[in-house]
Image (cartoon, grey):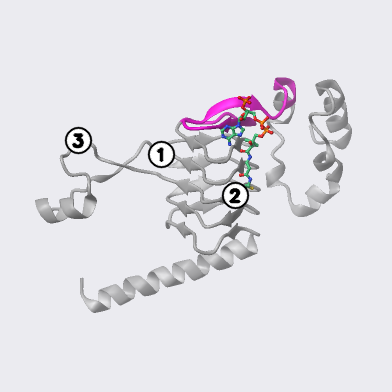
Amino acid sequence: MNFFKKIRIWLGCKRFELNRAADFKRRNIKVAKGSYLSGGVKIGDCTRINSPSYITDCSIGSFCAIGGRLVVRNSNHSINTINMQDWAQSKIIESDLRVVGFSKGDVEVGNGVWIGDSVIILPGVKVGNGAVIGAGSVVTKSVPPYAIVVGNPAKVIKYRFSPEIIELIKDVQWWNWTYDEMRRAKAFFEIDFKATDAIDIKKRLKEMGVI
Ligand SMILES: CC(C)(COP(=O)(O)OP(=O)(O)OC[C@H]1O[C@@H](n2cnc3c(N)ncnc32)[C@H](O)[C@@H]1OP(=O)(O)O)[C@@H](O)C(=O)NCCC(=O)NCCS
């Protein structure tokens, strides 16, 4: 690659990064300094990643609380060729045929998800809205909404709320409300969903106009 082409690519990347930083700031997104985000990473409003992480193309919803050292991968190496190292393969076979890029699909993380420290999410995994991923988990399979998963491979240990309450709130997409709407519905954010039964919660949500 000639020098001028390299400069053009560098300037293009720089402009993209500056635009992305401004967009994140405007939408209250924090991505810890030192993180790597590939070009196709989409992040929703007010999601915070607190310490350096490595994230390849994926979508992460709004209002997620993400600890640190999150790794999201969207591809595998081919395990069918004798060599699995991409750079060497292109030199040996003198072609652009890659040994990486085999994917089960991009990772999709829902809204209002809490991801503990040092989590790895593998290609193709979908994490449901409101789920929790425990510290140190390796997530190999999709996670249902409001489930709490832990371990390697991550398994559901429990749900944040009862099935009746999950049913009540599953269509309340509070992450799409404006900040003013959220503030007006302050009481909704103050509910302790574990302290009250589903009948009372339903009554209160109706009174608030949330359902
Ligand atoms: C997932 C988590 C929220 C669960 O908390 P909890 O509801 O209080 O769960 P408990 O401590 O009662 O644990 C329940 C069981 O799961 C196990 N467990 C909990 N977290 C685990 C984890 N991260 N990895 C493996 N097992 C875990 C416990 O050992 C316990 O097992 P047992 O039933 O055999 O005794 C919490 O353990 C966790 O990982 N928090 C993340 C902390 C973090 O990273 N914070 C910074 C990021 S913002």
Ligand 1 placement by image quarter: top right
For the N terminus, give its image quadrant. Answer: bottom left
The kind of residue on which mark 2 rests is Gly
Please tell me which residue is depicted at 83% across the width and 23% down the height of the picture.
197
Residue 60: image location, x then y, percent: 54, 46
At numbered mark 3, what does the secondary structure look like: helix, strand or loop? loop
- In the picture of the structure, the residue carrying the numbered disc 2 is 67
Please report whichever mark, 3 or 2, sits nearer to the chain's N-terminal start.
2
Cβ of mark 1 under 8 Å from ligand 1: the answer is: no
Q: From the viewer's perspective, is 33 left or right of 38?
A: right
At numbered mark 1, what does the secondary structure look like: helix, strand or loop? loop
- Which of the two residues, 203 or 148, is positioned nearer the viewer here? 148
- In the picture of the structure, the residue carrying the numbered disc 1 is 123
Q: Which residues are magenta?
A: 141-165
Cβ of mark 2 under 8 Å from ligand 1: the answer is: yes
The kind of residue on which mark 3 rests is Asn
Mark 1 neighbour class, 10 Å CA radius: few under 14, some 14 to 19, many 20 or more: many
- Which of the two residues, 104 or 53, is positioned nearer the viewer here? 53
5 is higher (above) or lower (below) than 94: below
Q: Is residue 147 magenta?
A: yes
Please report whichever mark, 1 or 3, sits nearer to the chain's N-terminal start.
3
Mark 2 neighbour class, 10 Å CA radius: few under 14, some 14 to 19, many 20 or more: many
Q: Are marks 3 and 2 in contact (CB under 8 Å)?
A: no
- In the picture of the structure, the residue carrying the numbered disc 3 is 80
Number of numbered discs visible in the structure rendering: 3
